[in-house]
Image: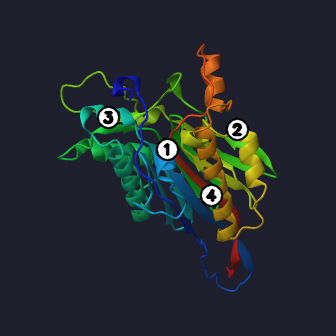
Amino acid sequence: MQSVLVYGRHFARCVMGYIPYDASASVDLPGRRSARRQMQLVTASCGFSKDSAANNNRPGQVFKKDIFGDDACFVAKYKNYDVLGVADGVGGWRDYGIDPSQFPSQLMKTCERLVKLGHFNAQSPVAIIATSYKELLENKTPCIGSSTACIIVIDNESKTLHSANLGDSGFLIVRGGKVVHRSEEQQHYFNTPFQLSIAPPGLNTILSDSPESASSSSVPIKVGDIVLMATDGLFDNMPESLILKEIGKIKDQTISSIQSAVNAIAERAREFAYDPNYMSPFAEHARANGMEFLGGKPDDITVLISAVCYAQDIDS
């Protein structure tokens, strides 16, 4: 087990779930009625803990909502905005007797609460991260730990995706079978991502980045797009070409079709993670950094897939 000082990742629990959304709304304009179509998301998620292979866990075994080992995630809606987030906890805190799943879990729960209350600027996802992190810092009992953080806000009215990504979790926008946008990965050096941290008093050697260090972007999004968000447990074990191949099997924009795809991707990534003879993306990066490494990287895996589609026709 690596220590917090070298930012190792160790994981414990598993969960999966999905959340469908209906972004329909109606507005009456005097003297005129015309049909318009409102954009919406259909979202499903799946995940495994690092240790789930030994326990032979399968999708559907729910241990704790929105907690995938030391990963955490949320999906929320406020008016015309759909907001998704993932966070990947640093497992080395176990060396200090601290549960590393608590920090990412509390961070994502706080982000979700702010969104549901409408206390956020849709064009600034980094502010959602910053406000949530500030709350954790100011708690009477600080939530000790570290994690990456990635938040996306989809404005269904302007058809724009706003994002903030701190660390090596991230997302892809897939259109017509091709990646048209991907988040920027942030690493201090190999296998040491940017991260938010709260350390106990007297421990001053813990790496901690500011929320404002997150990479931000705003890009147009279209009906028919697929948005995939995940922690590095996916990206370190499954190459983009195979992710796209599985996404290409999505038959329609129903929740069952999206759930089947996200299950298949998470399961495939877990298989790769425990294959000692597989040249994984992580192994390729390790070799590029002068390390002899072959095989997958056992890790927590969290995957969310959202299909961008039309809601039912509504009056406006």
Residue 107 lies, in percent from the top left, at: 37, 48
> Where is mark 2, residue-wise?
239
Q: Are marks 3 and 4 in contact (CB under 8 Å)?
A: no
Looking at the rendered structure, which numbered label has been put on residue 218?
Answer: none
Residue labelled with disc 1: 300
Position of 291 relative to 129 (above/below)? above
* Residue to which mark 4 is pinned: 263
Q: Is residue 5 left or right of residue 61?
A: left
Q: Which mark is drawn over residue 93?
A: 3
Q: Earlier in the sequence, mark 1 or mark 3?
A: 3
The residue depicted at 56 percent of the width and 57 percent of the height is 46
Q: Earlier in the sequence, mark 2 or mark 4?
A: 2
Mark 2 → mark 3, Cα distance in angstroms: 29 Å
Residue 151 in view (yes/no): yes
**Which residue is more in the foreground, 290 or 73?**
290
Residue type pointed to by label 3: Trp
Quick one: SS at disc 2?
Answer: loop
